[in-house]
Image (tube, helix red, strand yellow):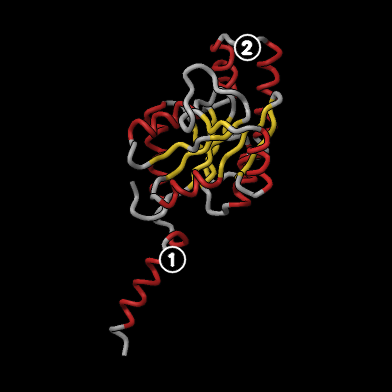
């Protein structure tokens, strides 16, 4: 875990890009460095799910109260239930020095960037469009219409990629995870994230200035 404040890392990407697998691998390799953001939801827990692990389970009244009090970084309604990112949990983990990983859609990611300007946005894709299509068809879980919708969505999302800080190509998982980890850790060295240390250095230097 970093001694300094952590960085909020937001992942988005095309369907079939493997962003969830990348996140899990980061957590597996560097458990003392990363924390996974836990979303809140108004749906009921499914068998085997635990409070604070898969989700923070809220009543609709509780959820909307948090949203009204600006305690959600972002939220949306999907299939009759609310889903969102609790601000308090993220801020707690960042203060503890963890780099917090958050996987959300592009709309939510840009909203988070507005609230937390120094959040690091990473967009994940396969190496080319043919691979996007082959990964979607290879899963064997969706019909042709669903795959067509996902490809159309990827086409639209390509316009938003330039709003992200980094474009990560997931061709080989091991290489991709190493690249993502390096990007995040190098981000800690940016001078804009070292203002307190720079101020301390200047104070130390002042004793040598006559």
Q: Nearer the viewer, residue 56 or 161?
A: 56
Question: Which mark, by number, is residue 173?
Answer: none
Q: Quadrant of the C terminus?
A: bottom left
Return the x and y of residue 182 as percentages of the image width and height: 38, 43
Q: CA distance from mark 2 to mark 1?
A: 49 Å
Return the x and y of residue 138 as percentages of the image width and height: 54, 11
- Please tell me whether residue 188 is drawn above or below residue 79 in the rendered image: below
Whichever of labels 2 and 1 marks the residue nearer the N terminus, that label is 2
- Please tell me whether residue 61 is drawn above or below residue 94 in the rendered image: above
Element under label 1?
A: helix
Residue 162 visible from this viewpoint: no
Element under label 2?
A: loop
Return the x and y of residue 9 as percentages of the image width and height: 49, 43
Q: Nearer the viewer, residue 203 or 89?
A: 89
| Residue under pointer 1 | 195
Q: Nearer the viewer, residue 168 or 203?
A: 203
- Please tell me whether residue 148 is drawn above or below residue 72 in the rendered image: above
Question: Which mark, by number, is residue 142?
Answer: 2
Q: Residue at x 43, y 62 (%)?
A: 191
Q: Residue at x 71, y 13 (%)?
A: 145
Q: Residue at x 66, y 22 (%)?
A: 150
**Label 1 neighbourhood size at 10 Å, few (<14), some (14-19), many (20+)?**
few
Left or right of residue 5: residue 210: left
């Amino acid at each position: 875990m970093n001694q300094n404040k952590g960085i909020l890392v937001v992942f988005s990407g095309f369907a079939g890009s493997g962003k969830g697998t990348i996140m899990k691998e980061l957590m597996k390799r560097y458990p003392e460095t990363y924390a996974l953001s836990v979303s809140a939801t108004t749906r009921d827990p499914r068998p085997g799910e635990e409070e604070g692990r898969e989700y923070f389970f809220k009543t609709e009244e509780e959820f909307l109260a948090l949203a009204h009090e600006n305690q959600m970084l972002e939220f949306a309604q999907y299939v009759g239930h609310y889903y969102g990112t609790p601000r308090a949990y993220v801020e707690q983990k960042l203060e503890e020095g963890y780099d917090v990983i958050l996987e959300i859609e592009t709309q939510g990611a840009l909203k988070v960037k507005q609230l937390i300007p120094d959040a690091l946005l990473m967009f994940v894709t396969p190496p080319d469009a043919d691979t996007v299509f082959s990964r979607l068809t290879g899963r064997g879980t969706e019909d042709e219409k669903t795959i067509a919708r996902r490809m159309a969505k990827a086409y639209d999302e390509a316009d938003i990629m330039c709003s992200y800080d980094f474009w990560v190509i997931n061709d080989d998982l091991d290489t991709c995870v190493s690249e993502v980890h390096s990007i995040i850790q190098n981000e800690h060295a940016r001078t804009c994230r070292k203002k307190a240390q720079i101020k301390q250095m200047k104070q130390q230097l002042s004793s040598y200035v006559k």
